[in-house]
Structures are given as structure tokens and as C-alpha cells.
Amino acid sequence: SQPTDRLENTLFSKVLVIYTGGTIGMLSDPDKGLVPVKKKLKETLSQNPLTHDREFAQLYLSQEYNQRYFVLPWIEGKSRILYEIYEYEELLDSSNMSFDNWRQIAMDIYSNYNNYEGFVVLHGTDTMAYTASALSFMLENLGKTVIVTGSQIPIFQVISDGRDNFISSLILAGHYTIPEVAVFFNHKLFRGNRVTKTSADNFNAFDSHNMIPLATVGVAIEVNENIILRPDAIAKFQVNTTLNPNVAILRLFPNISLDVIKTFFSYPIEGVVIQSYGAGNMPTNRNGFFALLSEASARGVIIINCTQCLKGSVHCLYETSKLFVEAGVLSGHDMTAEAALTKMSYVLSKTDWSLQKKKQAMMRSIRGELTQPPDPEREYNSLLQNISQFLNLTHPIEVQGLQSAISHVLLSSSIFHNDLNRLVKLCDSGINIHAVNSDNRSLLHLAVGGSHIDVIKFLLLKGLSVHTKDSYGQTALTEAIRHERQDVVEILVENGANLELNTLGDFLTRCAANGHLKRLQLFEIAGADLNTRNKSGRTALHEACLHNKAKIVRYLLSKGANKMCADTLGITPQDISTKLQDPEILTMMSADHNN
């Protein structure tokens, strides 16, 4: 069943919460200490007005939706967030997390990808950085927000960081398109493969020492749009579930023996992350050490050099670090140990890649896990500074507002005039191509109406999301269908766009009633089930028969439309055609179409 009519007229975003375990949902046991308890989290959240608006749910949700979804309280200017909690059968302490659990989380996101705007993974803190890093590599061509979060104190206790972490994660996942795997903790959203757990007993438990947060939640939510990693290829979301387990981390320490080191390079090890001193240094007075590294590298073991320091990067500044390079050791730059290990496991799983390609992948950023060289100074930034100074704008929020306004005007003009060259120049100047207008319409929304396909491909390659909704709940895909642009619909679908409309049945029946054959065809190309019902239980075939649209009837029947599907009054399309006696439609409806 569908939500009630009143909900269908209310904009909302759906978020799937995958509850794997962790402190956030634990209760104190006198004998065992903190332990996870099945179904307790759902029960608690349903009774808290901060996590579930019971009045709204009873008033606007159908019985099925009321049992399935929780609803966050209303936030001014934003859509309602409905979230569903998928609780794992076995709730884990994160210290028991394994590769199999990462695969399960990744596949649960994949199987539910088209049904939700974003995902929140509730997880224990001990191995959260490892899980977030692993997921960042496993989830390929990600176009939606995935946030891993948890807490230091259970959400059931009076003093807990769990409520803020949970609610903030839901808001970010439901209202913002940040197509990365992120970690949210203590008011900050970090790139998942950049964090490390830095405190065992503080609410500020995670930090990203070599990268600023993706977003900060305070009086306002400030998103650093310019550092968000976005898709750079036209491809659908997919999951790499194969991880190579033959990897290890070797942390150097004074007087470490050669025998200990040898064990890290013995069969079946295929990749080793060495945590060296400082800027990538290691002892030079250990006989056989470099020979061992050289021999391992020569037989195909990939060795990555990462610093033990929390902040900074590996540099070949000293003799000891340069010896690493001579031995075949690769620079890990400023990767965390968690990111380096999980990336190594991911890269080694690519059996169709050559050894050289695997090594190259380890030394460059593929998910934002290491710092790339800074971009040169941009002309646009200087222009923005001059305008800001002229208008006496100094506060970051004011400057950001100016930047958004100017960006969208310049870019919209290029879109309107179908000027790809100017669009490229603006992007090269450092302008924010992801800016939206007052209706939250992105450049992709504007372009699908009339721009050349090359402009649309350019925008997609620049990472504009096919999942972004405007203030009216419309995506670029629904706009392309409205403008009847098959070429655009096909490339958007190729890039992972899908129909998420809870009012899809109304769209289809309206198209059928008005004789919009092309739009129905495009809905079908976009993956729509043409037997989808509207709020009256009617299908497109009902309306086509009722309004004597013979071409529509012929098309729908060719696509397997159900002639005997009854609406809420028990009336079928067959009944309507029999009653109206349109000769052409009656002939088609009487024929055997395997219904």
C-alpha cells in the first residue's frame, strides 16, 4: 500500500538506518557489562519526541507506513525525514567486525539503494574507522550519502552523545547530497577514510588530522561543498564485495627483530602497510632489513609506507626514507593506517589489474583518502574576493551566500545559451558548479530541458548528482521525462538515476488520460512499472480506456499491462472498455495478451 493522500502531498526524504550494533544501542548487564539488546533501540526511539513525531505519523501515515517508518520532527524549510531501522539479527560489538560484515553492510546498501535518499549505519566506535574506510572503497560510483555513526555512551542514558550523533546523521543523510562514505561524530562530518579514533572516553572520539570536516553541525549546518568528492564517470552504482584478506600492518619500533619482520612478509601475505617513523623514516643499521623488503617487493608483495604520526605525510627528505623507495616501497602520503589497509585489500582484489596498475592505484587518490597537490590560484576566487570587499562582506556565511548567487547566475547563463566552452572555463576558474537556486534546482535540472547532450555529459562528469531533488521533489530524470528527451533519460539512467516518486501512479495515469505516449515510454525506459496504481487504485490502462486513448491502450498492452487489475471500487480496465464500447479499444482488450 501507499502513504495516504495527505502524505503524498507532503515532501519527504527516506533514510535507511542499518543497525549493526555498538555502544549506541547497548544496555548495562550486571554480569556482562554493556551488551546489545534486540529491538530495544526501536522501542526507545519510538517513544522519544525528538526521534519520532508520533502525532504526524498517526495523522499522515498509512497503517503500514506507521509500523514501518519513524518520522523526525519538522525542520523549517526542509522536507520531512522518514527513516526505517533495519536491525541485524546478530548485533555486534565492533571489535568482532570482519570482512563478511563489511560485505553485508555494502550489499544491504546496494539492495536498498533505489528506495532511499541516504543511509545511516549505526556501528561501534572501536573499528568504525576501518568499516568507513572499507565501505568507501567497496561502494563504487556512489551517488548518495552514507554516514557511519555511533556513540561513546548508550542512547538510553540521560547523558549521551548518541542522540545528537544519530539525529544529525539522519538530517545530513536525508537533506544533503554528499556522495561519500562519511563518519559523523561530535557535530562533525568527516570523510570516512580520513578518520582515526583518538579517544576512548571522550565525546570528541574521532578526528581527521589531515583534512577539514565535510560538514559541521552547529547553529547552522555548514557544508564544505568544495571538498566533497563526487562521481567523475557516467556509471551506475555498484558494489565490490571481494576483498583480499592477505594484508597486514607492520608498526616499526626500536630494536624490532628481523625475525618478527619476516613473519609479516611470509606467505600468504600480498600487501603490507608499514607504519614508519616521522616523515617515512626507518632504521638503516638493521642487517638484512632492506634486502627483505626488496625481495618481497620483487615477488609482487605491495608495500606501502605510512607515518605513525597522526598528522602529516610521508616525504622522501631523509636518507632512511629514500632507502624505502630503492627497496620498492611505495609512498602512502598522508593516508591513515585504516585507509591504507582497507584500500590495499580492495586493490588486491582487482584480479584483472596488473601489478603495476595496483601499485599506481595505491599511490593516488581514488576515494579522497590521500591529499592531492593543491590546485593553482583561480581567477574566479579573486573576483569573488573583490566583490566581497566592495560590498563589505566579511562573515563566511555572507561570502558563501554571495558565491552561491554569483555562481548560479553565471552558470545558468551558460546553460541557457548552451555554451559548453564558457561552462568549461567557469569550472576551470574554480566556480562552484554544484550551486543551486532558491528552488534548490541544480544545473542538471536546468540543462535537461533543452541543453545539448554534451553539456549534460559534462555536468555528470563534474559530479552533479542525478539524485538531487528540487523544492518540489523533482529530479533531473523526472524533468527530462516531462520535456520528453529520450537521449537525456537514457544517459541519466546509465548514470544511476531512478524513479523514487511515491506519486508515480498519479504521473502514469495522468499521462495515459492526456494521451502522452512519449512520456509513458520514457517512464518505462526509466524503470517504471506501468501497472503502478494511483491513490484511487487505478492504473494507466484504466485511464487510457476511460478516455478512449487507443494508442496508449495498444502500447500498455504491448508492455504487459494488466486488464483485470481492479481499482478501489472493484472496476477493471476490461470493465471500462466493455462499458464504453469503443470498437478499436474493445478489439484490443478482447485479444489474448496473456493477462
Image: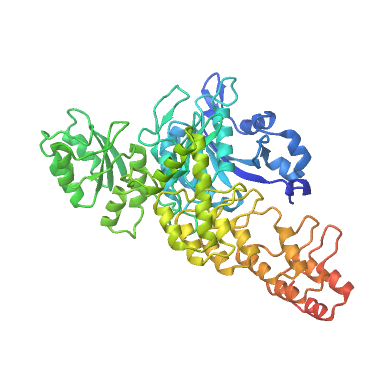
Query: Residue sitting at 39 percent across and 53 percent down?
Result: 428
Q: Does residue 360 lie above or below 105 as drawn?
A: below
Q: Residue 558's image quarter?
A: bottom right
Q: Is residue 379 left or right of residue 26?
A: left
Question: Residue 491, how many percent across, how many down?
Answer: 52, 64
Residue 318 in view: yes
Question: Residue 582, how many percent across, how many down?
Answer: 85, 78
Q: Nearer the viewer, residue 467 or 218?
A: 218
The residue positioned farthest toward the front in the image shown: 390
Question: Residue 297, how many percent across, how many down?
Answer: 20, 49
Q: Nearer the viewer, residue 580 or 350?
A: 580
Picture colour scheme: rainbow
Q: Quadrant of the C terminus?
A: bottom right
Q: Does residue 346 lie above or below 71 as drawn?
A: below
Q: Is residue 190 left or right of residue 88?
A: left
Residue 98 in view: no
The residue positioned farthest toward the right in the image shown: 579
Q: Nearer the viewer, residue 82 or 407?
A: 407
Q: Does residue 502 lie above or below 72 as drawn?
A: below
Q: Is residue 482 left or right of residue 134?
A: right
Question: Residue 568, how many percent across, how many down?
Answer: 83, 57
Query: Residue sitting at 74 percent across and 37 percent down?
Result: 56
Q: How many marks?
A: 0
Q: Nearer the viewer, residue 279 or 445?
A: 445
Q: Residue 485's image quarter?
A: bottom right
